[in-house]
Image (cartoon, grey):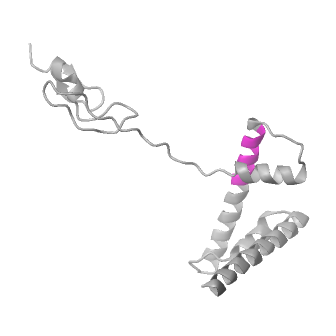
């Protein structure tokens, strides 16, 4: 018999049966900690943090409460709304990127976003979106002006 009786399934290293837990890679879902000494304690296991995904659920909920205060929304409906918002964002961002490339500009400005909204959204919806966006920009510039005046 050879000394290498087992092969670690994670890192493909030949191991003795007694050294099976001293392989090079940690188990799935765990980060690498210190390897235990001979006859020592178990390694310190660090928790893997979940990657945060961007979500618009709170904003969707606020708009729903403004329009219909007594109405509620299910998780499935919120998921559908979330995917609709993400799809619209992707379309507008893609169109604005194309406009930047066509004009040979490296910076995407308000003008490109506004033009992309006019191209992507149909008729009356684009007019409302542009007016709401302009209103939001004016509010933002008002806050910037107030902050500059305060300092």
Look at the picture and state if 22 lies above or below 146.
above
List x then y, in percent, for residue 104: 59, 80
- In the picture, measured across the screen, residue 107 lies left or right of residue 87, that is left
Residue at left offset 73%, top offset 70%? 116
Residue shown at the point (17%, 27%) measured from the top left: 40
Q: Position of residue 132 (x, y in %)?
A: 82, 69
Question: Which contiguous range is marked in magenta?
Answer: 77-86
Relative to residue 18, is residue 85 drawn left or right? right
Q: Quadrant of residue 127?
A: bottom right
Query: Which of the 4 image quarters holds residue 126?
Result: bottom right
- Quadrant where the image shows the N terminus: top left
Q: Nearer the viewer, residue 117 or 22?
A: 22
Residue 53 vs residue 65, the one in the foreground: 65
Give residue 114's quadrant in the image: bottom right
Quarter of the image with the C terminus is bottom right
Up the image or down, 108 lies above or below 95; here it is below
Q: Is residue 114 left or right of residue 11?
A: right
Magenta stretch containing residue 37, yes or no? no
Nearer-the-camera pick, 76 or 115: 76
Task: Classify 7 as above or below 118.
Answer: above
Q: Position of residue 93 (x, y in %)?
A: 66, 64
- Please report the residue visible at 67 percent of the width from the left and 70 percent of the height from the top: 96
Residue 73, placed above or below residue 8 = below
Extreme-top residue of the structure: 1
Magenta span: chief secondary structure? helix
The number of discs equals 0
For the point 25% across and 28% down, the residue is 42
Q: Is residue 83 magenta?
A: yes
Q: Residue furthest bottom?
A: 149
């Amino acid at each position: 018999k050879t000394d290498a009786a087992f092969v670690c399934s994670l890192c493909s290293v030949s191991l003795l049966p007694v050294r099976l837990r001293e392989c090079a890679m940690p188990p799935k879902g765990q980060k690498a900690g210190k390897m235990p000494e001979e006859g020592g304690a178990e390694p310190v296991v660090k928790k893997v943090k979940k990657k945060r995904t961007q979500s618009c659920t709170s904003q969707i909920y606020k708009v729903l409460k403004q329009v219909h205060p007594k109405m509620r929304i299910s998780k499935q409906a919120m998921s559908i709304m979330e995917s609709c918002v993400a799809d619209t964002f992707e379309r507008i961002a893609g169109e604005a990127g194309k406009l930047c490339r066509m004009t040979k500009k490296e910076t995407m400005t308000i003008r490109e976003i506004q033009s992309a909204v006019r191209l992507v959204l149909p008729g009356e919806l684009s007019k409302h979106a542009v007016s709401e966006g302009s209103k939001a920009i004016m509010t933002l510039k008002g806050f910037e002006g107030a902050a500059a005046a305060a300092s």
